[in-house]
Amino acid sequence: MSQFYWNGRPVSFRDGETLALALRRAWVKDFGPAAGGQQARYFCGIGQCQGCLVSVDGGAAVESCLTLARPDAVVTPGAF
C-alpha cells in the first residue's frame, strides 16, 4: 500500500482509491471547515455537494471524493 499525509499523519491507500475513501477508512470524519461555518466531510461521493473539499500539495481546493490519492501527497483541509 502507498500513503499520503493528512495534516502530517500518514494515511494508507489502495491503487485507484480516492482521498475521501482513504480518509474514511482511516476514521477521519472531520475534513476541516467548510463554507457557511459547517464541518467539511465525505457526504455525497460524486462531487455535487462539495462538502469534502481539501487542498493537495498546497493547491486550490478539490473534491476529495473525486481526487485519486497519490503517493506522498500532502493533503490538508481546503482553504476557504
Image (tube, rainbow, N blue to C red):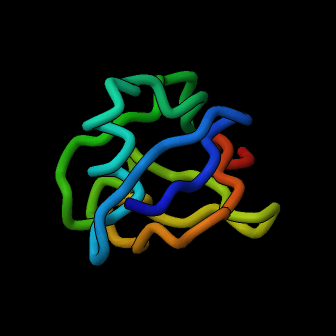
Task: Tell me which residue sits at (55%, 35%) in the image.
Answer: 34
Image position of 45 (left or right of 73):
left
Residue at the farthest right position: 58
Task: Tell me which residue sits at (58%, 40%) in the image.
Answer: 10
Foreground residue among 14 and 79? 14
Image position of 46 (left or right of 73):
left
Foreground residue among 1 and 66? 1
Q: Position of residue 37 (x, y in %)?
A: 57, 22
Please tell me whether residue 38 is drawn above or below residue 44 in the rendered image: above
Task: Tell me which residue sits at (49%, 43%) in the image.
Answer: 11
Q: Position of residue 24 (x, y in %)?
A: 29, 37
Q: Quadrant of residue 33?
A: top right
Q: Quadrant of residue 61?
A: bottom right
Task: Tell me which residue sits at (64%, 41%) in the image.
Answer: 77
Specify the quadrant that holds the N terminus: bottom left
Specify the quadrant that holds the C terminus: top right
Foreground residue among 71 and 28? 71
Please tell me whether residue 8 is drawn above or below residue 66 in the rendered image: above
